[in-house]
Structure formats: C-alpha cells, structure tokens
Image (cartoon, rainbow, N blue to C red):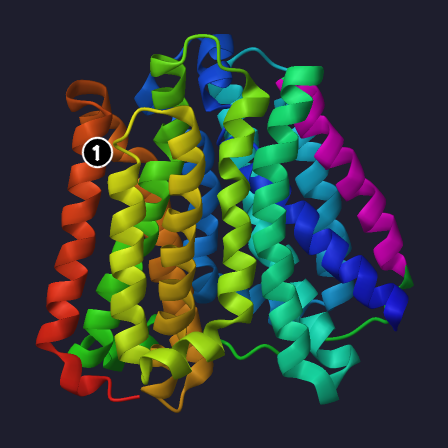
Amino acid sequence: MNFIKTVIIFTAILTLALLYAPQPIAPNLAIYFNVSLSEISWVLSVSLIPLAIAPLLYGYLLEKFSLKRILIFSLLACAIFQIIANLSSNFYFFLSFRFLQSLCIPAILTSLLTFLTRIDEQNTQKNVAIYVGATTFGGFVGRVFGSYLSDLFSWHFALNFFAILMLFCAFLCFAFKDSNSSVMQVSLRDFIPYFRETKFLVLLFCVFIMFFSFQSVLSFLPFHLKDIFKDITQTQIGLIYLGFLTGIFSSLFIGQTVKFFKSRFNTVIFGLFIFITGTIFMLIPFFEFYFIAMFVFCSGMFICHCIFSALLNLSTTQKGLANGLYLTFYYSGGAFGSVLPSFYYASLGWNFLCIFTVLLLLSSILILLKYRNFYKY
C-alpha cells in the first residue's frame, strides 16, 4: 500500500509539474517560435481548458473503462505527446500536441485521486489533503525546477525530463489493482439548479475571478521581469515562484486561520485583502520585492481557494456536483486569465494589469459583503 501511495503522490506532482513548467519559460518559447505575446499565452490556456470541461465529459469515460487502464494509457499518451511536441520548431504543431496532452491530464488526476481514496478508506480526509499538497508542490516543481533545467540545458530538455519521468510512472502503475471507477454520470441538466440560486452564483463568480486574477499575474510576470531586468536568467525567474509553496502551508493551517477569524466568511475576506496586497506589491520594481510579493500573493489566493471550496460544499448536499462545478469555474478562470490579459498587457503594460486585477478582486469583496447573509459558516 505504501508503494502504491508513493507512486500516486509522485505521479500527481509530476503531472502538475509538466502542466505548469512552460509558464515561467514562456518568454523563451516566444523567442524560439517567433510568435507574439497573445499567441504564446495559449500554451498554458489550452492545457487548462480540458480541466474546466472535465466534470461534464469525463464521467462517461471513467464509467466505461477500468481506472488502471485509463491511468496507464493517459500517462503514456501525455508523455509521448509532449515529446512529439518538442520535436518541431512550428508553434502551432507544438500547441496542437500540448492540447492533445492536456486532454489526458483530467483523466490522470481523477484516476489518481480515486485510487488514493480507495486504498485507505479509513484515512480519506488525510489522503485527500496529502493529494492537494502534492498537486500544489507539483506546480512549484514545474515552475522552479523547469526554469533551472532550461537555464542549465534547454527548455526542450526540461519538458522532456518531466515527460520521460511520466513514462516511468506509467510502468510503475502496472502494479496497481484493476478497478472500475463507478463515477456518477453527469449531464448539463444536473447543474441547472446551481444557476438559479444567488448564493451559488456569487461563489462561482468569485472562484472564476480568483483563478483568473492568479493566472493573469503568474502568466505575464516572466515577460515583465524580462522587460525590466534585461540580464535576468530563467533560474532567477523560476525562484520568484518559490512563493507558491505558501499554498501548502495555507492549506494545512486553514483550520487554525478560520478559528482566528471566527468564521469562514471573515477568513475569505481576509484572504482577498492579502491577495490584493500581494498584487499591489507587484507594482514595486525591485527584484527582491517581487520575491516577497509572491509569498503574500500566493498566501491570499490559497486561503481563498480553501474557503470558497468549503463554502460551496456547505451550501449543498450534492457535493459531487458542487465540486465539479467549482472545478469548471476555477479552471475556466485560469484558461481565460492565461490569454485575455495578453491584449491589455501588450498595449497598456504591467501596471495596468495589476491595477485591473486589484479591481476585479475588490469587486469580489463587494459582492460577497452584499450577500454575506448566505454564508454564515
């Protein structure tokens, strides 16, 4: 059991690492492929789109086939698509295979979490917390270690390194016991009641804005750093993302944070203000300050992430549907946040992007305060 659990955690880390590795090296990719800012921003966005639609479509796939087969096939396909993508100097060839690769990621993550919750049902809550921590750490590893490998060798080497490790994980997964997923089939009709109630619409709007804002800053920060620090290395850009580690601590200590602020509602308002503070700090053009700002910025985001998820679950008895809808809005926000800001960042600059992000987060605070009576938890 310990071996299988270790493989699951390692695979989860690796999957998120491969997903987010291109983010800090996007300026290098833009130069290599000779494409514009708006075009290169699609590299991450196309990877997040399948995660947004997964709750609507992947239930049927997971109902038909065994988890083991889905997991092994998805890992092999994900790794091979990345290796093929790296072979071409044509951007749209690269982007097409990144999209094909991203279709496998929801299946990998869903299968891993299902396996993890089944092998040790007595410690489900603990295992889920470990899984969330692993995915958070995976995003950190992809950004920081991927940047370091890009500096040391090349971006091709960095992405191939993660892909080859994923092939290795696929073979380790042959040790898993076969299982049918028994995932509930979901149709669009099941989600309609959630769009008829204000308490759900407010939360889903805030979730969308939260991850839109987060990805806006993270996706275009490398370009901004390249603009103001001409000699900055990929490793230095990657180190800025060390602040991402606060997501692990924010998640682990969220219970104590809620106790301190007396309620989840008060905690999420605090988290949004911290989020805003971190964004404002991004306006100060000193390298060391960007490093500090990222810790503040990520702390606020992950506090909000934990609380919004809890508030949505506490507002309904249909937790599976609620979580599916949460992920849809969460990753939709990320997909749009990786692309749309390219248009106003290119013409209006970094300061406008940060100020606009602050205004979006303030709108979430104002809407939450208006409907605070819905969230007395």
Disc 1 marks a residue whose amino acid type is: Leu
Q: Nearer the viewer, residue 118 or 367?
A: 367
Image x and y of residue 216, in percent: 32, 39
Above or below, 338 against 8 in this view is above
Residue shown at the point (52%, 13%) measured from the top left: 90
The residue under the point 19% across, 46% down is: 358
Secondary element type, mark 1: helix
Count the labels in the image. Answer: 1
User: How far across and how far down the image is residue 251, in percent?
Assistant: 51, 67
Left or right, 197 with respect to 298, comes to left
The segment highlighted magenta reads 155-174
Q: Which residue is drawn at the image coordinates 73% and 89% (left, top)?
A: 122
Query: Does residue 15 sit above or below 39 in this rendering?
Result: below
Residue in front for this viewpoint, 96 or 130: 130
* Residue under numbered circle 1: 353
Q: Position of residue 49 (x, y in %)?
A: 42, 47
Q: Where is the N terminus found, in terms of image quarters?
A: bottom right
User: Is residue 161 in the magenta section?
Assistant: yes
- Quadrant of res 338: top left
Residue 304 location, quadrant = bottom left
Q: Quadrant of residue 69?
A: bottom right
Image quarter where the C terminus lies is: bottom left
